[in-house]
């Protein structure tokens, strides 16, 4: 991510690190000519939390809880990615019912995440009524998650080798009722997104990204799928129970903001459909298999489809009780390039919506702050350098 | 209704001054509450606007570097003064205006514009980039809604053959409601009022997700409180004007409450129903649709008057 040096007589509107449009800290600089944006740059790294380093000091089980805390919105999918990688290293497979329950949690989480996004994106466009209504309805799915796990945000449903919570028929009935209500509401929101004149004026033809651009910039998730780039880990490399209960990929042609709204709402409806299918054919089995405490040495990668796109984990085990290295690449990181590219040529008023259009998650993607120093090669920092820099910085 | 009160009391307490400010706060509360209920929220408590105001007044006012000190302090006062003065010519609360002369309609509209201009100047009198963008947008919006709004106000004036607000009010009370004869004018006036007050969907000048608080970003404490208060008063004046002109005049306090309340209800509904317009969309809407509609209305009225004169 580049942070350009800028001349004196250019008018730059800074957004962030503290700004009402941003719910998390990030810094964007938009060079404007009147209302037209002629240049954009992004600077991240305000919420680097050292989670990857922290993971090396915790046991495999403790890490489950740490990984869940990478993201507050898609907590379950992080734990799932981690657990699946560890299970692969250990050579075990979770029982069918456990895998189905993982999918249930993942899809409920997707519903809640997409509805949250719908509200935030509408708010960025100044459509507060949609914001309030979609967040009200989101409470329904939050209640379901609370009923299943006792928690609204960090469900901690995963265990290495299975899941913690069972889904009883009684719970399924309650969730079915909730899903019926949600589906009804989503049909309404789709209607609003497709037919509200002022809303279409703010979304159609704004931030249009072609399929080629999406591929070139490495976009993932709904952002890429809205540009007709058909790639979904759930379909292309099924994990959990996605082979037994497949989802249909939702793609759109247009590639603009409007397409991103439509893709996300249709994806939410698809989640509801797949949840119903799972409830109708819930496999019977144990919830957990036995996993050795020491994970055999080896390296693996684990990919899952988070609500924002492909989530990638690299896990390396030295054969001990703790991982040697865990590398997380969250989907938001892949999508930043699209924001910077698409911003140019649009109005300043469109910036918050383009920004929100990728459903960014700042804290998730902050990994390491690379600081440019002129007398130093920025690519090579030894441990002593880093330590010195830290001491100097806080002096 | 006609009252005889000492001029000082009129200016300072009732119906000008203090009473006007309190009613501004009440209308702000009603607006916020209605919008909140339409959005399925709880909304503020009744005393919330007053609490906000008192808190802001008690706070330290920070004058930023790069701003002209005198202007920074004076602009909120000018804004509030113009709003309070404009109210003197308008039949507030159904009471006959105490100061009235031929042409006071133009003066009242001018004073309300002076408020917006002080807002724009307040933004321009700052080196803050959000303020500057906000000021540009405030003034751009001023140039877009002002003409259609004025046209919509001229319609009833032409029908009443007078430039005096009290006479137009009296005329509107005698004939059928002008909303029936001039529906386009009413629509333009109501939506123009929303543009004037920078209410959603015309809130691009203070779009918080883009430019924080627009022109008022650098204002805190007293200055901010006064600007907020003057906008609340502008809301009451605007509603009274539209109700007096188009909804059959305002002759007593009960009528005032019912008619302005009804208008506020419609306005709150309009505020919730749309996404925010970009500033270019606002300008386009006003000049392509609003101004044209206003002109068509004026033309229709002129033809109507001509025909009537020819008939009689």
Image: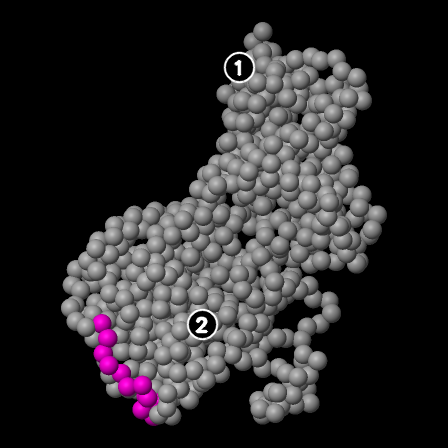
Q: Secondary structure at mark 1?
A: loop
Question: Is residue B302 something that shows in the picture?
Answer: no
Residue that appears at 76% across and 15% down: B5
Q: Nearer the viewer, residue B42 or B300?
A: B42
Q: Is residue A199 above or below residue A275?
A: above
Which image quadrant is residue A167 in? bottom left
x, y (%) of residue B296?
A: 55, 29
What mark, if any, has residue B229 been given in the picture?
A: none
The local crowd at label 2, few if under 14, some if 14 to 19, many if 20 or more residues have their Cα within 10 Å, is many
Magenta residues (range): A287-299
From the viewer's perspective, tell me whether residue A83 is left or right of residue B56.
left
Q: Examine the residues drawn in magenta and state their main secondary structure.
A: loop
Foreground disc of the pair 2, 1: 2
Q: Nearer the viewer, residue B101 or B67?
A: B67
Instruction: For the N terminus of chain B, give its image quadrant.
Output: top right
Residue that appears at 66% across and 31% down: B22
Which image quadrant is residue B92 in? top right
Q: Is residue A186 above or below residue A331?
A: above
Q: Secondary structure at mark 2?
A: loop
x, y (%) of residue A147?
A: 31, 57
Q: Residue extending furthest top?
A: B312
Q: Nearer the viewer, residue A153 or B279?
A: A153
From the viewer's perspective, tell me whether residue A265 is left or right of residue B253.
left
Instruction: For the C terminus of chain B, give its image quadrant.
Output: top right
Which residue, given by chain and number where applicable, does mark 1 sit on?
B176
Which residue, given by chain and number where applicable, does mark 2 sit on?
A70
Residue that appears at 68% across and 73% down: A6
x, y (%) of residue B90?
A: 68, 23
Q: Residue extending furthest right?
A: B70
Q: CA distance from mark 2 to mark 1?
A: 66 Å
x, y (%) of residue B19?
A: 69, 27
Which image quadrant is residue B15 in? top right
């Amino acid at each position: 991510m580049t942070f350009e040096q800028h001349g004196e007589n250019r008018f730059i509107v800074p957004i962030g690190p503290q700004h009402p449009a941003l719910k998390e800290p990030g810094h964007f600089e938009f060079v404007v000519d009147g209302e037209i944006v002629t240049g954009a740059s992004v600077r991240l790294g305000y919420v680097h939390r050292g989670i990857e380093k922290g993971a090396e000091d915790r046991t495999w089980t403790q890490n489950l809880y740490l990984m869940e805390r990478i993201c507050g919105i898609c907590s379950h999918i992080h734990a799932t990615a981690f657990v699946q990688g560890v299970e692969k290293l250990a050579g075990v497979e979770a029982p069918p019912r456990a895998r189905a329950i993982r999918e249930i949690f993942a899809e409920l989480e997707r519903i809640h995440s997409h509805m949250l996004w719908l509200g935030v994106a509408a708010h960025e466009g100044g459509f507060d009524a949609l914001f309030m209504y979609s967040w009200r309805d989101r409470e329904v799915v939050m209640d379901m998650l609370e009923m299943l796990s006792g928690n609204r945000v960090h469900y901690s449903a995963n265990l290495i080798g299975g899941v913690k919570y069972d889904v009883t028929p009684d719970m399924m009935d309650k969730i079915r009722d909730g899903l019926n209500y949600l589906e009804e509401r989503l049909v309404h929101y789709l209607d609003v997104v497709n037919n509200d004149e002022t809303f279409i004026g703010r979304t159609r033809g704004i931030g249009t990204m072609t399929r080629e651009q999406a591929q070139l910039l490495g976009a993932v998730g709904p952002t890429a799928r809205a540009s007709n780039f058909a790639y979904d880990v759930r379909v292309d490399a099924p994990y959990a129970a996605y082979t037994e209960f497949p989802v249909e990929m939702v793609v759109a042609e247009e590639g603009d903001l409007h397409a991103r709204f439509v893709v996300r709402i249709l994806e939410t409806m698809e989640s509801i459909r797949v949840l119903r299918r799972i409830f109708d054919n819930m496999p019977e089995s144990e919830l957990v298999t036995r996993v050795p405490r020491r994970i055999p040495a080896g390296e693996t990668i684990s990919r899952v489809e988070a609500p924002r796109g492909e989530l990638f984990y690299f896990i390396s085990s030295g054969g001990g009780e703790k991982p040697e290295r865990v590398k997380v690449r969250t989907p938001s990181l892949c999508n930043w390039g699209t924001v910077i590219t698409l911003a140019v040529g649009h109005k300043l008023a469109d910036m918050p919506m383009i920004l929100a259009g990728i459903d960014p998650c700042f804290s998730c993607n902050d990994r390491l702050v690379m600081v440019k120093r002129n007398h130093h090669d920025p690519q090579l920092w030894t441990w002593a350098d880093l330590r010195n820099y830290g001491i100097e910085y806080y002096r | 209704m006609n009252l005889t009160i000492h001029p000082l009391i009129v200016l300072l307490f009732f119906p000008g001054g203090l009473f006007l400010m309190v009613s501004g706060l009440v209308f702000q509360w009603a607006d916020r509450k209605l919008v909140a209920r339409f959005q399925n929220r709880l909304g503020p408590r009744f005393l919330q606007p007053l609490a906000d105001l008192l808190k802001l007044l008690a706070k330290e006012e920070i004058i930023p570097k790069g701003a002209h000190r005198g202007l920074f302090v004076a602009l909120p006062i000018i804004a509030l003064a113009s709003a309070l003065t404009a109210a003197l010519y308008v039949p507030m609360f159904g009471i006959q205006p105490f100061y009235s002369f031929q042409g006071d309609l133009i003066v009242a509209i001018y004073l309300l514009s002076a408020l917006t201009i002080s807002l724009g100047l307040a933004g321009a009198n700052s080196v803050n980039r959000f303020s500057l963008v906000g000021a540009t947008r405030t003034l751009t919006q001023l140039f877009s809604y002002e003409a259609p709004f004025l046209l919509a106000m001229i319609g009833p004036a032409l029908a009443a053959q007078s430039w005096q607000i009290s006479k137009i009010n009296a005329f509107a009370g005698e004939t059928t409601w002008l909303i029936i004869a001039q529906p386009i004018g009413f629509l333009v006036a109501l939506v123009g009022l929303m543009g004037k007050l920078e209410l959603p969907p015309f809130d691009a000048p203070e779009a918080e997700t883009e430019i924080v608080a627009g022109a008022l970003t650098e204002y805190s404490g007293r200055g901010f409180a006064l600007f907020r208060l003057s906008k609340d008063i502008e809301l009451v004046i605007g509603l009274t004007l539209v109700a007096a002109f188009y909804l059959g005049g305002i002759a007593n306090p009960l009528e005032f409450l019912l008619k302005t309340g009804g208008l506020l209800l419609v306005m709150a509904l309009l505020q919730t129903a749309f996404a925010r317009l970009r500033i270019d969309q606002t300008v386009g809407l006003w000049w392509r649709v609003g101004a044209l509609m206003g002109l068509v209305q004026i033309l229709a009225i002129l033809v109507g008057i001509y025909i009537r004169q020819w008939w009689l």
